[in-house]
Amino acid sequence: MPVELKGNIVVTGANRGIGLELVKQLAETTGEEAHIYACSREPEGSRTEALRQLTTRHPGKITIIKLDTTNEESISAAVQAVQDQIGDGGLNLLINNAAIRKPASSGALFATKKNDMMEVYETNVVGPFTIAKMFLPLLKKAAQRDSPAKGSDNKTACSSAIINISTAFSSIEKCPETFSAAQMYPYRISKAALNMLTRCQAEDFKTHNIVVTAIHPGWVQTEMGGEKAPLTTMDSVLGMLSVISSLSNKDSGMLLDWQGNTIPW
């Protein structure tokens, strides 16, 4: 049984780019029983205006949650806010999408400072680590509620998943092919670490029947990806949601692209 895009869904970094498009398409394609918790660092800020408009177009379907991925207290408060709304329902899908890239240039060695490395690592690795850790009790609730009956032969069934948005630039094997295009030291290194986090949590959470998969969204036309990127957010997210909806336990701990192809570590 694949991961069904239903129930309670949390998306981080939901105020723009890929995160905003994820919320939009999830709101449009999931059934009445689904609810999306769209996380933003500044829910009332100007950069969250598009997300607020989206909640108006889909009344009762989207709840905006304040969440700063670098602040443990903010994460804890966000978990409590979601818990208060879902009760015993559990969390079916957590998409760790929030990420940053520093410095703003190509991230060449001599343009990159220590603070760039530390800030990117904190947001792109420590953030998803802490978020998954704190949301784990809610993920376990969903997995336990909808797990296969004892003695069932269905060993691939899952109803709770964590998706870590990664990148092809995280691939150590493919680095010689991609390095000249964009060096991006902090971003590449942080996403490689995110891949290991994905692998570790896949092993750790498999006893709970929780799938953990990293997905590369492609080179996308976003604030980070730039105007020259070949993919629109709509096409990227359409592909990713198709991949997510077809995931099973065999995909846990893998790095896939937006079309479902495996990317080497």
Image (cartoon, helix red, strand yellow):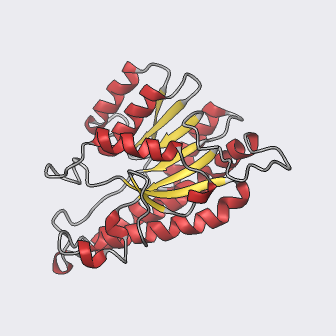
Against 86, residue 178 (above or below) is below
Q: Quarter-wise, where is residue 202 in the image?
A: bottom right
Between 56 and 160, the one nearer to me in the picture: 160
Task: Identify which residue is drawn at 52% across, 67% down.
Answer: 197
Which quarter of the image is occupied by the N terminus?
A: top right
Taking the spot 41% from the left edge, 51% from the top edge, the residue there is 97
Left/right placement of residue 102 relative to residue 157 reads left
Q: Position of residue 149 (x, y in %)?
A: 82, 44
Q: Is residue 51 found left or right of 3 in the rendered image?
A: left
**83 left or right, relative to 23:** right
Which residue reaches farthest right?
A: 151
What residue is drawn where x is 35% and y is 61%? 167
Number of dots carrying numbers:
0
Q: Residue at x 19, y 69 (%)?
A: 182
Give the percent coordinates (x, y) of residue 13. Answer: 38, 46
From where the camera sits, is residue 119 visible? no
Q: What percent of the width, then of the height, locates residue 107?
A: 20, 71
Query: Residue 245 location, x and y as percent?
Result: 52, 42
**Residue 59 appears anywhere in the view:** yes
Corner quadrant of residue 59:
top left
Rendered-image quadrant of the C terminus: bottom left
Question: In the rendered view, does 32 fall on the left or right side of 68?
Answer: right
User: Residue 141 versus residue 44: which sits nearer the camera?
Assistant: 141
146 and 73: which is toward the camera: 146
